[in-house]
Image (tube, grey):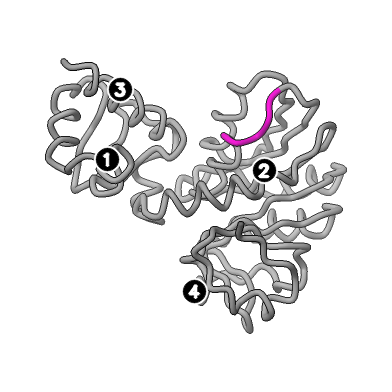
């Protein structure tokens, strides 16, 4: 196998450790090669990768991996999610206690957190926790409760009570939909109580969403835009939204 192929495989593996699954087209764009080249690389490493239905995942994916992400976000818009999270990571300060929500965007924020900065992170999603626990110098508090495969997260009334007893400096919240008039929504009912408890207790609330989430409405409404101190998104966000959200929109 050539050095270029090995470099591509290493890059693809690192990406999948964060996102768990990626579309073949997105993988080709990431690596700067054709889809056929990616398929050849994947076929040559069948002990590492699984290719199914146009999606690539690791042979032993992180808990909550392929099924969750294919059902919810289909592995799309990884570049936009990464960009939004890189912006959000600027607002993490040394000594903070922060909350990281569940979802397919927040793992990119977990990956972007600085190391050895005396930061405590509260989370309830396995795919987020697995990234955090590998970063030196982070304290990780994993909320318990019943496991929900639809979001690879744990949630019940005990989780809510635990949140109410924590002092969270900044909460980084995810969402499946952001609508100017209706508010911020998600797909899973079990997430709502967790999200609302965090919004009630955190000193600062930051919504982290990529630009494709705007003008989308999901089944479960959990907040109004005015409850957030800012929104971190990607540079492709419509600039006209900045004056309509009721809070600062940070996209660059």
Q: Looking at the image, is mark 2 or mark 3 nearer the viewer?
A: 3
In the visual, does 237 lie left or right of 56?
A: right
Left or right position of 177 against 62 = right
Secondary structure under badge 3?
helix
In three-dimensional space, the C-alpha distance between marks 1 and 4, rounded to whole angstroms, equals 31 Å
Which residue is under mark 3? Answer: 7
Q: Which residues are magenta?
A: 111-115
* Residue 235 place in picture, x, y as percent: 53, 60
Q: Residue 79: image x %, image y %?
A: 43, 49
Does the magenta portion include 114?
A: yes
Side of 44 relative to 230 (left or right): left
Numbered label attached to residue 89: 2
**Mark 3 or mark 1: whose residue is earlier in sequence:** 3
Dot in front, 4 or 2: 2
| Residue bearing the label numbered 4 | 216
Front residue of this view, candidates 40 and 204: 40
Where does residue 249 sit, x and y in percent of width and height? 67, 66
């Amino acid at each position: 196998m050539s050095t270029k192929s090995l470099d591509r495989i290493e890059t693809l593996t690192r990406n999948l450790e964060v996102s768990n699954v990626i579309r073949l087209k997105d993988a080709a764009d990431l690596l700067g090669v054709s889809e056929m080249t990616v398929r050849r690389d994947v076929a040559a490493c069948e002990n590492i990768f699984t290719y199914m239905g146009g999606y690539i995942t690791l042979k032993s994916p992180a808990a909550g991996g392929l099924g969750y992400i294919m059902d919810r976000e289909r592995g799309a818009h990884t570049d936009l999610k990464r960009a939004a999270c890189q912006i959000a990571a600027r607002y993490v300060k040394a000594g903070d206690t922060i909350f990281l929500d569940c979802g397919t965007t927040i793992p990119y924020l977990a990956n972007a957190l600085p190391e050895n900065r005396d930061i405590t992170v509260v989370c309830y999603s396995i795919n987020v926790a697995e990234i955090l626990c590998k970063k030196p110098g982070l304290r990780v508090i994993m909320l318990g409760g019943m496991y929900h495969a639809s979001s690879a997260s744990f949630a019940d009334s005990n989780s809510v009570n635990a949140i109410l007893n924590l002092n969270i400096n900044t909460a980084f919240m995810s969402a499946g939909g952001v609508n100017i008039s209706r508010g911020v929504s998600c797909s899973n009912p079990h997430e709502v109580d967790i999200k609302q408890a965090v919004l009630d207790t955190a000193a600062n609330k930051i919504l982290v969403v990529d630009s494709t989430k705007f003008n989308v409405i999901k089944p479960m409404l959990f907040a109004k835009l005015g409850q957030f101190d800012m929104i971190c998104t990607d540079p492709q966000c419509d600039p006209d939204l900045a004056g309509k959200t009721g809070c600062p929109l940070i996209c660059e």
